[in-house]
Image: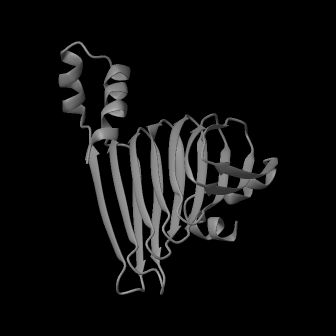
Amino acid sequence: MEILYRAFRRYIDLNKLKALPKIRNNTMVHNSVQRVFYRYNALYEEDLTIEGNSNVLSVIGGKNVVVVRRITVKHSSDFSLNINIKNNGWIILFDEIILEENSSAGYKLYGKIGGEVYHYINVVHSRNSKSNIDIKAVVLKKLISIGILEHPVGSRRSYGKLNQLVIAKPESKIVLLPGIKVLDPDARAVHGAKKVILTKDQEFYLRSKGLSSNTILDILEKSIIYMI
């Protein structure tokens, strides 16, 4: 929690978190597919352990939701985490992923952000581990996204990729902060970021072709997942 406070204290009043009820979970996922919903005005703290080939879909909606997760991907496991965000309030999402030797993680955050989202992802690699982190969202109001890839000494032949792609309106507030820390000479990390602004002239043109504002946003939300 202290890291969360340090990461976002410049952007939000964290005192409002104190009023939220806390929900604590310890979860083991073993060779399975799970769907997890975070809907209530609460602070969720979760320790998630992944074994085998597992897939987790997280749906984060509602208002005033905080999700703090520590995810450990065990030796030789393959993990896929998809996060769908739909909100009109504010959401804080804080994920720390620990990759053990020979493990891999695919992480995709996507959705249409109608409120405020404060997102932090930190991936710590071990030997022969791989990560592919995708942040792809249509932002109507505000997104603060901090992504960090860590490759400590001993993480040889590890590979991390962080991709941040956002489509936004001119009045949207976007902050994309990448961080790459490579301390092993045989490790590699790459990062790419792009902000695409949907101008009022472009929106007017699309609406002149018979598309409503909601239809335009729905098309963008579905298509951004496939953009590089």
Q: In the orientation shown, which residue stands out farthest toward the top? A: 210
Q: Is residue 217 left or right of residue 144?
A: left
Q: Is residue 121 above or below residue 172?
A: below
Q: Residue at x 33, y 50 (%)?
A: 165
Labels in figure, total: 0
Q: x, y percentage for residue 119?
A: 53, 55
**Which of 119 and 207 lies nearest the eye of the viewer?**
119
**Which of 96 and 219 lies nearest the eye of the viewer?**
96
Quadrant housing residue 162: bottom left
Q: Residue at x 36, y 63 (%)?
A: 161
Q: Is residue 210 left or right of residue 77?
A: left
Quadrant housing residue 192: bottom left
Q: Residue at x 35, y 31 (%)?
A: 222
Coloring applied to the structure: one colour
Q: x, y percentage for residue 121?
A: 52, 61
Q: Is residue 171 above or below residue 193?
A: above
Quadrant housing residue 194: bottom left
Q: x, y percentage for residue 140?
A: 42, 38
Q: x, y percentage for residue 218?
A: 37, 26
**Which of 33 and 10 lies nearest the eye of the viewer?**
33
Q: Is residue 35 left or right of residue 201?
A: right
Placement of the N terminus among the 4 image quadrants: bottom right
**Which of 199 and 95 lies nearest the eye of the viewer?**
95
